[in-house]
Amino acid sequence: MRLHYVLLRAPPSEIIVSPFRWVAGTYWDWDLIGFDLGPIGAECSLGSDRLERFCRSWRIFRIVFRPLKLDIRLEVDSNCWLIGYDMAAPWDHGLYLGPINLQVEYNVRYAEDY
């Protein structure tokens, strides 16, 4: 199952559509910045880690259901300002409200004690 399709690629940028990503907002990581509106998004690679100092994340709580291999986390990310639902992978779901996000993952990190 493909989770996103590239509509237009002009390095270092691309415009993508994802039927499983229904969010609105902006995000950035060490070397890229992105904008989303519904299932359509745009990303631009900056080619360096110039945004690293603006990327911070804090976990508010974590619940693990080991028999179900389920990991649920409430986090605050300084670099992710979105509103909506995102399925990054079939086993990785997120609900976003500004910098606050609820991550639900199946069979990914449930065994880790972090």
Image (cartoon, rainbow, N blue to C red):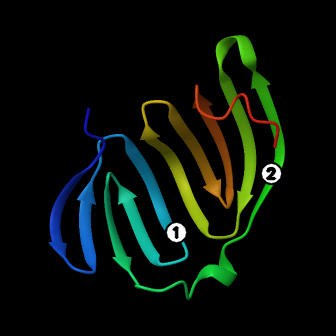
In the rendered view, would you say 50 is above or below 104? below
| Residue beneath the point at 54% across and 72% down | 29
What kind of element bears circle 1?
Answer: strand
Mark 1: give few (<14), some (14-19) or many (20+) Cα within 10 Å.
some
* Along the viewing direction, whichever of 66 and 88 lies nearer the viewer: 66
- The x and y percentages for residue 109 are 66, 35
In the rendered view, would you say 86 is above or below 110? below
- In the drawing, what numbered circle is on residue 59? 2
- Marks 2 and 1 close (CB-CB < 8 Å): no
What kind of element bears circle 2?
Answer: strand
Q: Amino acid at mark 2?
A: Arg
The tag earlier along the polypeptide, 2 or 1, is 1
| The residue positioned farthest toward the front in the image shown | 112
Query: Distance between the Cα atoms at labels 2 and 1?
Result: 18 Å
| Residue beneath the point at 52% across and 69% down | 27
Mark 1 sits on what residue? 27
In the rendered view, would you say 12 is above or below 79? below
Q: Amino acid at mark 1?
A: Tyr
